[in-house]
Every structure is written in C-alpha cells, then in structure tokens.
Amino acid sequence: MITIFVRIAIVGHARSGTKRGISLPLQKADPAHYAARMSSAVHGFTDDALGTLDAVGVAAALRAGEVSRSEVLEAAIARTRRVDPSLDAVQVTCFERAASSPETAGVFAGVPAFVKDNTDIAGLPSCHGSAAFTPHPATVTSGPGAQFLHSGVIVLGKSTLPEFGLTASTEFTGRAPTRNPWNPEYSAGASSGGSAALVAAGVVPIAHANDGGGSIRIPAAANGLVGLKTTRNRLLDQPGARKLPVHLVAEGVLTRSVRDTAHYLAAVERFAANPALTPVGLVEGPSARRLRIGLITADVLGRPVHADNGAVLASAAKVLAGLGHEIVEMRLDVDPRFVEDFKQYWAVMAAAMALSFRLGHRGYFDPRKLDPFTTGLIGLAKRNPLGVLASTWRLRGGVAAYDRHFAEVDVMLTPVLSHPAPRIGELAPGQPFDALFTKLVDYVGFTPLNNVGGGPGISLPHGLLPSGLPGSVQLATGRGDERTLLDLAYQLEAASPFPRIVDRAAAAGAA
C-alpha cells in the first residue's frame, strides 16, 4: 500500500531547479515584540488603495481606474511588511517579481494574493512547511497553481503551513508559529493557516488554500473567513491525487466575503471544468428558496461540542429558521471506526509524501529534519500495514455513507470545530505523538467527513466567541451542489453580517 502511494506521488511531482533567484522571508520580530502585541488584534487595514475592499471590490476599482495596479500592490506590500513580523504567516516573498509582472486578465485581474507553500509556482520554492527542504525554485507551475493564477491575481509570495499540511495548527519546531490576527495568543488553524492569517489581517483580500481534512475550513473558522471545500474533482488537483485509493484534497481559496468565493469558483471552473459534474456557474446572491436543514450538534464520535461553539451554532440555526428554513435535528451516521481509519490513512499519506520528497528532491530534502508529528505518523504507518488496508477499504465506502445524510435534508448545519481555536502551543508538533493526535481528534470533529465523502462544505463566520475570536459554522450539501451552499451562505451573510477584525480592534482600543 505504501509503495502505491509513493509511486503515484513521485510520478506526479514537478521537478525543481537550482537555488538561484529565491526570495527571502521577511525579517521576524523578537519575542519581546510578541509580548507587547498579544492581547490586541493585528491587522493592516488602513486608508490606502486596498481599504477594506474584498477581492471583487478591488478588481472593480482597478477596472474603473479608481486605483492603479501599482498603488494596490504597494499597499499590499506595505501591509505585509507591517503585520507579518507579528503573525509569521509569510513563507517567502517575491515583491519585485510581482511589481514587474505583466498585466493579467481574469475576474481578479491585478488583485494581490499569496499561494500556499505546498503548491508549485515556477520560479518560487515549495517547502511544504518543512525544515527538511532546502529551498529551491520550482521549474513548472502545477495545475492548481495555474488554476489560481487564471483568476488574474498577482502573487506576492508563499504562505505558511505546518509540515506537509498534516496537522490543525500552523506551528513548527525550531521556528515561530503562525499567529491568529484576531489575537496572536491563539492558533491561526491549519493547514492553510498562513493564507488565512494574511486575508483576515487585511494584507490581501484572497489567498490560495487546499483542504485534505479541513485545511480550508479550519483556518477559515479560526480567522473569521469564508472557506469553501468543493466537491471532489470539481477543480484541478495536485499531480497524482486522483489516482490515490481515497482522494481527500480539494483546492480553493480563503476570502472575507461569500461573493469573492463564488466569483473565484465560477472563474476557475471555466478554466478547467469537470464534464462529469454539473457546472456551478456564478452564484451572485441569495434566492428565495427555502430548505430543510439538518442540525448537527455532536461530532462523529457522538460527543457534544464546547458550549461556546454550541451557542454559535444555535444562533446560526435561529437566524436560518427566521428566514423561513426548516431546521430539524439529526446526527452523523458514521462507522464508529471512522476516526481510527482516517488516522491510519493520514499516516500512510505522511509516509508517502516523505519518501516521494526524498526521492524527487535529491540533495534538497533531509528526512532527519522532519518534525516529531510527521515522524510519529510515519511510524504508525509502518507498524500496522494490514490495518492500513482495512482502513482504506472502509474509507472507500465513505461516499455512500456521506450521501445517506441527504436523504431527508437539503443541507447539514454543523460546527466547523469541536471547541474554540486553541492557544499557541497546545497543538505544537513537538509534544508526544499520541497526546497530540488525541487533541486533534477532540478539535477536528466535523470537517473530515466531507473529504472522505467527497461532498462540498463551507465554513462561514458567525458572531464572536467570549474570547473575542470569531465564531463559525459549517454548511454541507450533497456532492455537486455548491450552488445551494453559496445561496444559503449569501442568506446567512446578509441576515447576520460577518464579524470584522477592524471592528474588534476598534472596540478593544476604545476599551
């Protein structure tokens, strides 16, 4: 089984070139700087060319000539330099390259953005969040990278992720963690944590992300953003992903508005539509359609969520009921072995990636520098190869199990996470493997089902938690039905406007 994963990963991975032309990370602040900033929000919103506009708004301002491309890029670069020393969300920059790049076309032409550092962009290094890599520029832009660029964005650099995107907080051994801009004492989530922090902090209005177990939706929830995980195979995937026994990962973006996510999906769907799926098209706003919504309050193991998350969920259900939707209570119908099966498969993915990187990046990858969580997963895969086969077989039945949930409802309304975002250090990768994995199971109770089942799910901000961090909920529908998700997301956004970090910062300043 491990051999199968490795062969696919090696065949699909683009070769990288030499070290020449690599951009350097921004200068980071010392610990004393962090201590002075912990209790307050960190953001870059100001009266510049970006203002508080979302990506659709920035693109419209550029087309109308209200701002110039250079003004927008200069604003984003200045914001990056101002906030990243506190957030550590940028892996590498390419400011000069962005400034000298040709004009782009597309729905977000000229809009500045970051790409997650597990996706190849020719000329930029991809280190996958790992100290095991010696940075060296990729020679080829991957399919997902080309898909993102097709929207017209101007890439300013790469955003951080935890090693290989394997855990739920963007933290590391031997370097500073990526922090939550709403309160830097807290995790920004993962694995698209760097992208989420940069969008939430107003550095850019949109950033690339991908999701293999919640890695778009988890950081969206932690940072008060919109994060859509699309139907399996809706968009282009990383090389070789569709040949895996259970294809988990979906590509996408993190945004501050539903319309940005809707416009991005429509644009890149036209770039590479999947003929096996009905096109989503552009969903431009809410409809008058009323739905039957199943309310889920317990995770896949039947455990109730933290009271703060439960209160946010109840509030969202009340808003949707007030709009005329029918809310019915239901539970997740999942094989009780689901968590262990996902853990086993996740372990094999870690082993496959480590070996494929070692073979595909000879001289640039040192497995001795892998972090303890990754090595723990690799060890788990090696200890139980027969268990991996059984787990994979059961997970392949996840599509039918997922589909059963929509036999009597149109949409499921769930928490995104089982408890609020943890403080920095609680999910750090240097702690004992079993202890950390137990914490991850307790935290990530709702998102992996969509990855195994192949259905779409969207994380939406809703209200504030007692800690001052944003609340969130997840909407999920049957495979291929992103239109319903976006329709309902627009309705919730209009009825209960999303919390804004600038409002929290202003309130904290007034206090």
Image (spheres, helix red, strand yellow):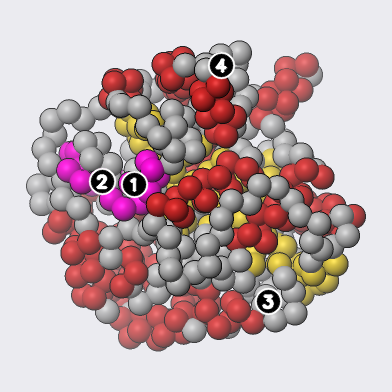
Mark on residue 145? Answer: 1
**Residue 145 seen from this side:** yes
In the image, residue 235 above or below residue 501: below
Residue 406's mark?
3
- Quadrant of image for the C terminus: top right
Q: CA distance from mark 1 to mark 2?
A: 6 Å
For the question of whether residue 308 can be seen, the reply is no
Mark 3: amino acid: Phe
Q: Which residues are magenta?
A: 130-150
Residue 141's tag is: 2
Q: Nearer the viewer, mark 4 or mark 3?
A: 4
Look at the image and tell me in which quarter the N terminus lies: bottom left
Give how far apart the Cα atoms at labels 2 and 4 are. Answer: 32 Å
For marks 3 and 1, the one nearer the N-term is 1
Choose between 236 and 386: the one closer to the eye.
Answer: 236
Magenta segment main secondary structure: loop
- Is the C-beta separation of discs 1 and 2 under 8 Å? yes
Residue at left 56%, top 28%? 60
